[in-house]
Amino acid sequence: MKNSKTKAKYQTFIGLEVHIHLITESKVFCGCRNVFGSEPNTNVCPVCMGYPGVLPSLNEEAVKKAYQVAMALNCHLNEKAVFERKNYFYPDMPKNYQISQFEFPFGVDGYFDLELADGSTRKIRIHDVHLEEDAGKMIHEGSQSKLDYNRAGTPLLEIVTEPDLVTGEEAEAFVQQFRQMVRYLGVTDGNMEEGSLRCDANVSINEFGKGLGTKTECKNLNSSRFIKKALEYEIKRHTKVINSGDTIIQETRLWDESSSKTSSMRTKESSNDYRYFPEPDLPPYWPETKFLADIKESLVELPGIRKNRFIDEYGINQQQALFLTSEKSMADFFETVVEGDIEDKSLPGTVASWLSGNVQKILNNSGQGIEESSLSPRRLLSILNMIKKDKISTGIGKKVLGLVFEADKDPEDIVKNMGLDEGPDESEIFRIVSDIVDANPKVAEAIRDGADKQIGFFMGQVMKATSGKANPGKIQKLLREKILTGPEKN
Ligand SMILES: [Zn+2]
């Protein structure tokens, strides 16, 4: 009741600022290594420590990755990109300014097709995509605060959306889908716990048709679930404040997961507080047409497009296509197996259900990704082929799959070494049965005369000849047939 009334009265506006840590060998303006988890202050140099007189030089790999994201977000690429100094003081930033982009970032005015819960999509406008350097890290231990500058100067890409999202759930979905996209592009690992993907959210509410309200910014949202919870909390808080006749103060608020609340951190600076000005030590960046064309050419197929293609091309269902395309490595694996036997039209469906069922179960238990496991597309195809050719049953196939993961061996070898195959087929068993019965006419005669127990003698002989792999029921049936019709055939 209350909810629907609120919804009818106010309109919500949510915008996100998503930061991703780019995967590069070195930092964005110096040659220091760009890695997570080193001993504190071991990946530092005069440039990223902000010593006087040093000069930054731009890392082209970071630029390439920035353009990849800008292109994937359908941005207009500025003819020239300009780096600017964002001035503020904080101990984790030794230069007292951060090199960022402001007026001329790499990309502007893009959009992201957000897939909504009902399966429809909505365009979320992207304000801009800009490259900047990260700050160091402050670690508080008891009464001490320590500084680690390993992260200072590592490449950070910031993506700013327009306030087009309307619920916490949508914001959560945006971050999840965006994360999937940038992982597909291979520009970041998107690990939120390690801070490779960080998100701040702006939210405001206002009466319908009156435009944006006064916004607050939520920080400390280091999981997509927190984003949803923090925004839902803020929307309720805004509604309550406005309903009571008070006004919202523009400020930055911190999300506290333990109390499930946001609290005021500082009143928000406006951009002119930062006194942005062009970085005098870096010339404007003019990308060459060929450089951009090569990047565009190298862009991978994005997850949403790939999912729809899987449904159309392979005839698999929505659920399976969603699963298969959730990670690029899984989607690549699937297609490699399917391409192994393009004649078999039922193969895509079989592979999809094996990957989403048996294989995923094992991966979940081991916490491995498919690319780091010992299952290769060729190995999975070989298991499926043995099942198709009745060499092994589906049950044995599952067992072999588990053993491939455990022992890192080829399925054919596992089946051979463990004697898991079904053994000879019916015609082969019949040939063996015939030979043995023909070689022992007196025993056959005795059985025909009523000494039924003697059939055990033949059973033993046939089992031995087939190394115990033939089905006993099948042997017995064929034996009786042969013994009964035996004399006529002789
Ligand atoms: Zn450095």
Image (cartoon, rainbow, N blue to C red):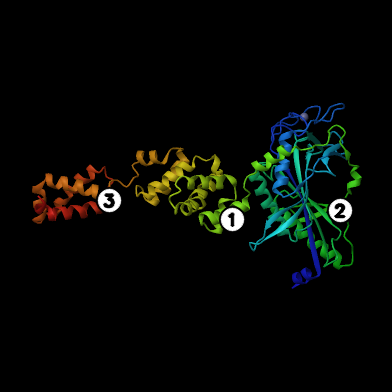
**Ligand 1 found in image quarter:** top right
Q: Secondary structure at mark 3?
A: loop
Mark 1 → mark 2, Cα distance in angstroms: 42 Å
Q: Is mark 2 within 8 Å of ligand 1?
A: no
- Sequence-wise, the earlier of marks 1 and 2 is 2
Residue at 33%, 42% in the rendered image: 419
- The percent position of residue 172, horizontal first and vertical second, equals 70, 55
Pick the residue in front: 422 or 260.
422
Q: Is residue 299 left or right of residue 389?
A: right
Local packing at callout 1 (Cα closer than 10 Å; few below 14, some 14-19, many 20+) is: some
Pointer 2: what residue? Answer: 251
Which of discs 3 and 1 lies nearer the camera? The answer is: 1
Quarter of the image with the N terminus is: bottom right
* Disc 2 residue crowd, few under 14, some 14–19, many 20+, Cα 10 Å: some
Quarter of the figure with residue 185: top right
Above-or-below relation of 41 to 102: above
Distance of label 3 from label 2 (alpha carbons): 76 Å
Identify the residue position indicated by label 3 in the image. 471
Q: Nearer the viewer, residue 68 or 242?
A: 68
Estimate the x, y position of residue 432 in percent, counting from the top left. 20, 45
Report the residue marked by disc 1. Answer: 308
